[in-house]
Amino acid sequence: MKRVNTVLIIVGILMPMLAISQNVSKKDRAKSIVDAVNKKDASQYVKNFSENVKVYMYEEDGNFILKVDGKEALFKNRKAHLLNHPQVRNKIQHLAEIDNRLIMHDIVWLTPERKEGSSVVEIFTFNDTGKIERVDVIQQKNLFNE
């Protein structure tokens, strides 16, 4: 009986610790997104997002316009993007975590011929489960025209 109690106490202590260690940090999610782009893996990319994720793009008129609504739409969007730009790569420049948001500044190269990459800033808003539920994107207006 004493052994059973000891085991129960140990399990009671270890289980919460294990649960905490399973949480993916905001910075790890951002790194996973960049890694997914560099691997051309749309499935890995969307694992970081909630089912009802919304992606907004900054427009020149100063407003954010809804461009992607839902995880399935995000998967289709990212898959098409990776097919259209098979040599795309990106690299994180800065990460800043503020409350339930993570701001990521990364550099994107659509082709290897481009010596200088293009700056992109994403503001990820996380829900209570640690998944991204909103993304606000600011990028160069001519990113896809060059």
Image (cartoon, rainbow, N blue to C red):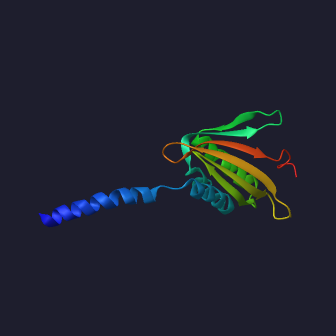
Does residue 41 appear in this view? no
127 is higher (above) or lower (below) than 88 = above
Q: List the single residue furthest toward the bottom.
A: 3
Quarter of the picture containing the N terminus is bottom left
Rendering coords of residue 55 (x, y %): 66, 40
Judged left or right of residue 76, residue 59 is right
Rendering coords of residue 77 (x, y %): 67, 45
Residue at 38%, 59% (x, y): give it.
Answer: 17
Residue at 76%, 51% (x, y): give it.
Answer: 120
Does residue 78 appear in this view? yes
Residue at 68%, 62% (x, y): give it.
Answer: 38
Rendering coords of residue 119 (x, y %): 79, 53
65 is higher (above) or lower (below) than 29 = above
75 is higher (above) or lower (below) than 24 = above
Judged left or right of residue 19, residue 115 is right
Image label count = 0
Rendering coords of residue 5 (x, y %): 18, 61
Residue 57: quadrant of the picture: top right
Residue at 57%, 58% (x, y): give it.
Answer: 28
